C-alpha cells in the first residue's frame, strides 16, 4: 500500500502537528534520563501522547520492558513477543510504540494511520495471527519508505523542516505526524484533534 498525500493536505496538516511534536520531542529527549519504570512524570506524558489507558499493573509491565530494552537494538518482532510473554496478549500497537521510542526511524501502528493506508490488524482469532501482524508491520514500514522516495515525500520532508527547523526527528516520524492529521477520505482529521489530544 502507498501513502497518499497531496501538497495541499501536507500544508494544511503541518500547523496542526505542533502540539504533538512538542510532546513527542520531550519524550525522546527524556527517554534516557532515568528509570522509566519509576518516573511517574515520564509515564504520565507517555500515556497522554500515546493514549495508554491500561491499569497500573499492565503499565508496570510495559514500562519495565521499555526500560530494559531502551539501550538495545530491538526489532518489532522481538518486542511483540516479549510483550506477549509479559501481558498474555499480542498487542501490536503498543509493541510498535515501544519500538519506535527506542528506534525513531520505525513506524507506529495506529488506527488512523492504518485507515489512511487501507490496512487493518488481523482479528484476535485469526489463524497465524502473529505472522500476519509481522507482515503488516513490514508493509507499513515499506509504505513509509516508498513514499519518502517520491517527489511528494521529499516535499513533505522539506516543508516539515521549514515549519519546524529545530525538530530533530526521523523522516518516518514526519510522515506519521502528518498522516495522523489526515482522514482516510483525504479530508483533514477533526479540527484540533492533535492539538487538543495529541496522543495516539
Image (cartoon, helix red, strand yellow):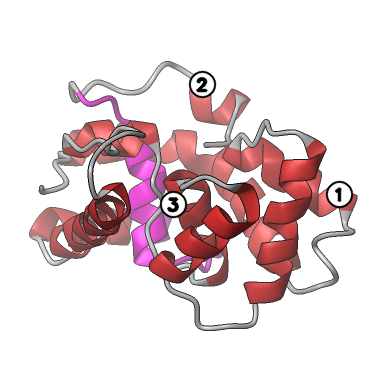
Q: Are marks 3 and 2 in contact (CB under 8 Å)?
A: no
The answer, for residue 160, to whether it is visible in the render is: no
* Mark before the other along the chain sequence, 1 or 3: 1
Label 1 vs label 2: CA separation?
25 Å
The relative height of residue 123 versus residue 28 in the rendered view (above or below) is above
Residue that numbered label 2 is attached to: 192
The relative height of residue 53 versus residue 32 in the rendered view (above or below) is above
Task: Please identify the quarter of the rendering in which residue 124 is found.
Answer: top left
Label 1 vs label 3: CA separation?
28 Å
The mark closer to the camera, 3 or 2, is: 2
The mark closer to the camera, 1 or 3, is: 1
Q: Local crowd at mark 2 within 10 Å, few (<14), some, or many (≥20)?
A: some
The mark closer to the camera, 1 or 2, is: 1
Residue that numbered label 3 is attached to: 163
Identified at 32% across, 53% down, the residue is 130
Task: Please identify the quarter of the rendering in which residue 161 is found.
Answer: bottom left
Q: Position of residue 196 (x, y in %)?
A: 61, 24
Residue that numbered label 1 is attached to: 41
Q: Position of residue 11 (x, y in %)?
A: 30, 38
Q: Local crowd at mark 1 within 10 Å, few (<14), some, or many (≥20)?
A: few
Q: Position of residue 115 (x, y in %)?
A: 25, 31
| Magenta extent | 160-184
Task: Please identify the quarter of the rendering in which residue 61 is found.
Answer: bottom right
Q: Is residue 167 magenta?
A: yes
Label 3 vs label 2: CA separation?
18 Å
Amino acid at each position: 500500500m502507498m501513502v497518499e498525500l497531496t501538497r495541499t493536505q501536507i500544508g494544511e496538516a503541518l500547523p496542526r502537528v505542533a502540539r504533538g511534536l512538542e510532546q513527542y520531542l520531550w519524550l525522546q529527549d527524556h527517554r534516557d534520563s532515568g528509570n522509566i519504570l519509576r518516573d511517574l512524570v515520564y509515564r504520565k506524558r507517555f500515556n497522554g501522547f500515546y493514549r495508554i489507558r491500561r491499569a497500573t499493573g499492565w503499565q508496570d509491565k510495559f514500562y519495565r520492558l521499555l526500560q530494559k530494552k531502551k539501550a538495545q537494538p530491538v526489532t518489532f518482532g522481538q518486542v511483540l513477543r516479549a510483550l506477549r510473554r509479559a501481558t498474555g496478549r499480542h498487542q501490536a500497537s503498543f509493541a510498535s510504540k515501544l519500538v519506535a521510542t527506542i528506534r525513531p526511524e520505525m513506524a507506529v501502528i495506529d488506527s488512523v494511520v492504518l485507515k489512511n493506508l487501507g490496512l487493518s490488524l488481523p482479528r484476535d482469532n485469526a489463524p497465524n495471527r502473529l505472522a500476519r501482524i509481522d507482515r503488516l508491520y513490514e508493509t507499513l514500514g515499506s509504505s513509509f519508505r516508498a513514499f519518502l522516495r517520491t517527489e511528494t515525500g521529499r516535499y513533505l520532508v522539506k516543508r516539515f523542516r521549514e515549519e519546524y527547523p529545530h525538530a530533530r526527528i526521523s523522516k518516518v516520524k514526519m510522515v506519521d505526524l502528518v498522516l495522523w492529521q489526515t482522514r482516510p477520505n483525504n479530508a483533514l482529521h477533526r479540527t484540533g484533534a492533535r492539538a487538543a489530544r495529541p496522543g495516539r
